[in-house]
Amino acid sequence: MDALSRYTISRANPTAPGPANLIETHLADSHDITDNTSNHTMGAADLCAANIRFWTISQADDLLGCGALKTHTGGVAEIKSMHVIARARGRGIARILLEFLIEQARHDKSREIVLETGTMDAYAAARALYERQGFAYCGPVAGYDDDPNSAFMRLALEPDAQ
């Protein structure tokens, strides 16, 4: 059985109880690490915007993580609110979710996918995951300002043939 077949990725309403709890945990974790002026974590209501799609990843009925894609003009997709709960880390769930988000952006015919994450040690594993998937460091993306607490990354995409 491959890793993906053990998990289900589903579109979700970020304000529904399970996803909202995940987002609250993500917000709390990020606020513990990042000061408010450098924190770009979105709340559940913000993730309901028309240009954002939100997904959860679960195993059976166990909600393990979430992630979103925000669509910008010019064929740019941005990863937002990617989070895996602490007890589920180390199983490859973040990689599975990231690969799913990249494929969604390709399917949407996005020309690139971008993200902002922290430069602090607590974000080292996330940055390493993005690097392994081919993301490269770049200057500020998607309207962000230059910030020493922010790492900006970009992955050029070739839209799928469909």
Image (tube, rainbow, N blue to C red):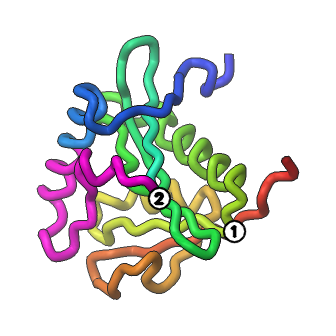
Badge 2, how many Cα within 10 Å: few under 14, some, many 20+?
many
| Quadrant housing the N terminus | top right
On the image, the x and y values in percent for residue 137 come to 52, 77
Check if mark 2's residue and mark 1's residue have beta carbons within 8 Å: no
Looking at the rendered structure, which numbered label has been put on residue 67? none
Judged left or right of residue 159, residue 84 is left
58 up-or-down from 49: above or below: above
The reply, left or right, for residue 139 in relation to residue 49 is: right
Residue at disc 2, secondary structure: strand
Q: Which residue is mark 2?
A: 70
> In the image, 103: left or right of 51?
right
Instruction: Please give the name of the residue rendered at 52% of the width and 69% of the height, measured from the top-left corner.
Output: 72
Q: Report x, y in % for residue 105.
A: 63, 54
Q: Residue at x 62, y 75 (%)?
A: 74
Q: Amino acid at mark 1?
A: Arg
Outermost residue toward the front in this view: 50
Q: Is residue 26 above or below residue 135?
A: above
Helix, strand or loop at mark 1:
loop
Distance, label 2 to label 1, CA atoms, is: 14 Å
Q: Is residue 55 magenta?
A: no
Task: State the residue at coordinates (43%, 83%).
Answer: 140
Q: Which residue is mark 1?
A: 111
Amino acid identity at mark 2: Lys
Image coordinates of residue 64 in percent, x first then y, are: 37, 28
Q: Residues within 10 Å of mark 1 (few under 14, many from 20)?
A: some
The segment highlighted magenta reads 26-50
Q: Quadrant of residue 117?
A: bottom left
Residue drawn at 18 percent across, 42 percent down: 24
